Image (cartoon, grey):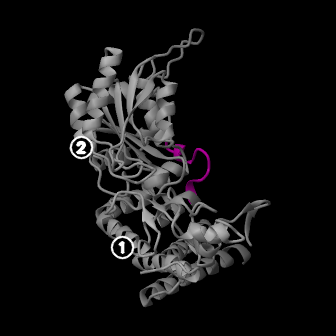
Amino acid sequence: MSEKAVYETFEALFALTDLRQLFRETKPLFNFSEEQKKEIRRILERVRKSLETIEGETLK
Amino acid sequence: MSKICDDIELRAREELFINIHPIQAAGRLTAEAMKAMITYGDGYSTCDWCLAPFRLDKIKRPPIEEFHVELAEFLGMDEVRVVPGARRGFQAVANSLVDKGDVVIVSSLAHYTEFLAVEAAGGVVREVPLNEGNIVTAENTALKIEEVKREMGRLPKLIMIDHFDYQFGNEHDVRDIAKIAKEYDIPFLLNGAYSVGVMPVNGEEIGADFVVGSGHKSFASPAPSGILATTEEWANQVFRTTEMVGDVTGRRFGVKEVEMMGCTLMGSNIIAMMASFPAVRERVKHWDEEVEKINYFAREFLRIEGNEVQSEMPRRHTLTKVDTTGSFDRVARTHKRRGYFFSDELKARKIVGEFAGATKAWKLNTYGLTWEQIKYLAEAFQEIARKYGVLVT
């Protein structure tokens, strides 16, 4: 396994932290604006990319 | 529900609820600070590149030294140290300036830790009475100085006044009090626990010799964290370094500052403060909007018959003391859940942070809520009032 898996773990945690922040800003109704939905998509894509890298690095 | 481990539950109230807790609002972390907590949580994490002279505020990687310089500029002061909470700032100043029996003037709304700091130093506090609006004025401060001078035959050693107090969130006359302090040549400590980090605060403009701030109250930082800033004139005294020499070993620790006990905020707390700093610098520019939001809320809150705002009006701070004796407390008197009915109703609307069971005088804080959240909050109170037959005009 390369160091990449470790850094991608942090990248995923950071992206999820951004999502956590978005929950804080929209609670308690979570009425996401179009811009916020766009941001959520970006975050989820980032996490997926990190997970793929981690999976490839650790389970190959 | 997820757990951290065994019996430590997950805390997700900031993600799920509108939290109006009076002291929690402005200490909520930024996303950057949360990331700092994830990566720098290990004990001595800030010590990876701690080189000579081996002191926290001199560390260059991560840029802790630079943060200290920028923080001092931000506050309009010459020197700054981070400390484990505002209370440790009061303590450092009191220990440095106050001798046994010395008088320290504080506000009648002073935080208890100001009392403790003075007591630990061997001093005694004398309180400035409030005016009819629950404000500490320069006039009353001058009268108190004269009273102490008359009774003790000497001047107080220090004046410590809260910029905004914790009970009402009222703004006190700190600029004029600073002028009075200067006239009597008494050092003035500004307790900015509720102002530093949420609004622009410039110690030099105010005329403060010391500015104390709270990281966990107003700087989007974890507890404990705080700030002690001072001028060139006082820095050598408050940040004096040790002169102690071991009698057997002859050891000296010359660079370590006595009142700071060497290093102060290590690990994730200092890094989280640093991570929040850019957002804090930006958010203080938008304080007017925070004040606009609390005033909107207060107006809507007062539409409920029997509701009162005990803090000064219009509001100048988001921390606000309210009285619902004439409204929700009337309901509580005959409700089977007594005062807890109110907490139940708020929680059902995803609102937390009120003093559970309290329906007379209690405090709330709206800092950091979006307009959408503020309007939701105001409507929730009115909805509860209507449900129980309390008139909303």
User: Looking at the image, is B186 positioned above or below residue A9?
Assistant: above
Name the quadrant of the C terminus of chain B: bottom left
Residue shown at the point (53%, 45%) measured from the top left: B48
**Residue A37 % position (x, y):** 48, 88
Q: Nearer the viewer, residue B156 or B299?
A: B299
Instruction: Point out the residue furthest to the bottom here.
Output: A34
Q: CA distance from mark 1 to mark 2?
A: 28 Å
Q: Which mark is residue B296?
A: 1
Left or right: B191 as drawn, with respect to B376: left
Name the quadrant of the N terminus of chain B: bottom right
User: Looking at the image, is B33 positioned above or below residue B237?
Assistant: below
Q: Chain of mark 2?
A: B
Does label 1 or label 2 sit earlier along the sequence? 2
Q: Nearer the viewer, residue B99 or A6?
A: B99
**Magenta range:** B39-52
Left or right: B48 as drawn, with respect to B128: right
Q: Give the SS element for disc 1.
A: helix
**Residue B300 occupies which quadrant of the picture?**
bottom left
